[in-house]
Structures are given as C-alpha cells and as structure tokens.
Image: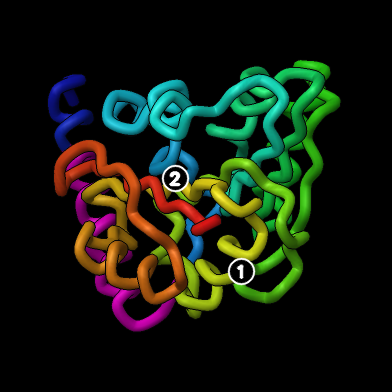
Amino acid sequence: MTAAVILSAAAVAALAFVLAWRLLARRASLPCPTACLWLLENRMMERVAGAELLLDRAGVQPGMTVLDAGCGPGRLTIPLAARVGPAGQVLAVDLQPGMLDRLQARLESQAFRNVRTLRAALGAGMLPAGIFDRAFLVTVLGEIPDRLAALREIRAALKPGGVLSLTEVFPDPHYQSRQSVRRLAEAAGFRVVEVFGSWRAFTLNLARPE
C-alpha cells in the first residue's frame, strides 16, 4: 500500500469521525476526549487560530491575570504563562482529569510557576469573581451544556472592563456560528468590542461593561 493511499484513507477516516461527532453533538454536549488531541493541536488549527495570534487579538500583556476556560492540554495555557510572565497569573480550567494531567506535565517540564489548574464544569459557579483581566474560550462553547450560564459565570469572573476572547473554528464538531455566539454573549451581558476573521475561523472580543 502506497503512502498516498494510506494518507487518503486516514483523511477519509478523520472526516468520517468529525461528521459522526457533529451528529452526536447535536444531541449532547460532548467534550473533546483526551484521545482526540489531534483535533486541538494540528497545523490547520495553528494556521487559523494559533496561540500567539489569539493572545495578540486579546491584547494580553505582562502582569495580567488570565483565565483559560476549557484549557485542554495547554495549547493556549503555556503561551499565556510565558506572555504574562512571573508577575502575572493564569488559571487553567478543564472538566477532564486527563487533559489537566497532560497540562501539568507540560508545566513541570518547562518550569512554569504562574499557572494554577482547576477541574470544574464551566457554569457550575466555581470560578473566582472579578479577578481576571482576560479570559479565553477557544473551540469550547459548543461542548458546554448550559452555555448561557457558562458565559455569565465568565463575565462575573472578569474585572469590570475585562475581556473574554472567544474563538470558533470550522469544522470543529461543536462549531458555533458567529451570529449565535453574538446573541448568546449579549444575553449574558457582554458587549462585543472587536471581531476578527471570517465565518470559518473567527474571534469575538467580548467586554464586561465597567
């Protein structure tokens, strides 16, 4: 079997998996399992929603306190820790122990001391209130059963004037359209202050009013 045939078969299998997951996602909000990290960390994701690009869009600066909501294995957490520096702080939140275990191993291997992890469901009321300058929600919103409650909790966790930077990328199995995200964010009390990208890969910066 040639390499081209193997690659084609792998591409078809990956597409079938994504389509099946999208169908399941219409019936239930399913978080990305640890075994499927290739959906989160691949060249396509880095090209359209690379960590440094997203940090720049949100205006992350040294010394900030930042929430990485639905952090997964740390694709954003590690660059955030480097960007905010020792004077800053990152809280990385995820529901799945396997994701947090992978993140913790990465943090220890790179000797970061400015990241705290928390196992929690977004919307369950476990986030500290009013302390974050920035928050990130990257290809996570569609995995949350009560999305409005989660956005309201993140809004309350931000400082007045703080910003939630929310990114969606198609064909993520839980992709949410820009229009639906905007409606939900406004219902949660956010104000849309910046929009980046196209419908295929977009970021909305959502401010907590002062």
Element carrying mark 1:
helix
Element carrying mark 2:
strand
* Magenta span dominant secondary structure: helix
Q: Position of residue 195 (x, y in %)?
A: 26, 43
Amino acid type shown at disc 1: Glu
Q: Earlier in the sequence, mark 2 or mark 1?
A: 1
Left or right of 144, for residue 134: right
**Residue 192 vertical placement versus 102 (above, below):** below
Please tell me in which quadrant of the rendered image residue 10 appears: top left
Give yes or no for residue 186 being in the magenta stretch: no
**Disc number at residue 153?**
1
Pick the quarter of the image with the C terminus.
Answer: bottom right
Q: Position of residue 203 (x, y in %)?
A: 32, 43
- Residue at 27% over, 56% down: 18
Residue furthest to the bottom: 27
Count of numbered tags: 2
Check whether the beta carbons of the residues at disc 2 and disc 1 lie within 8 A of each other: no
- Residue at 61% over, 36% down: 74
Inter-mark Cα distance, 2 to 1:
14 Å
Q: Position of residue 80 (x, y in %)?
A: 61, 28
Q: Foreground: 187 or 33?
A: 187
Q: Which span is picked out in magenta?
A: 9-29
Q: Residues within 10 Å of mark 2 (few under 14, many from 20)?
A: many
- Residue at 49% over, 50% down: 164
Pick the quarter of the image with the N terminus.
Answer: top left
Left or right of 20, for residue 53: right
Q: Foreground: 56 or 172?
A: 56
Q: Foreground: 96 or 161?
A: 161
**Disc number at residue 165?**
2
**Residue 187 vertical placement versus 209 (above, below):** below
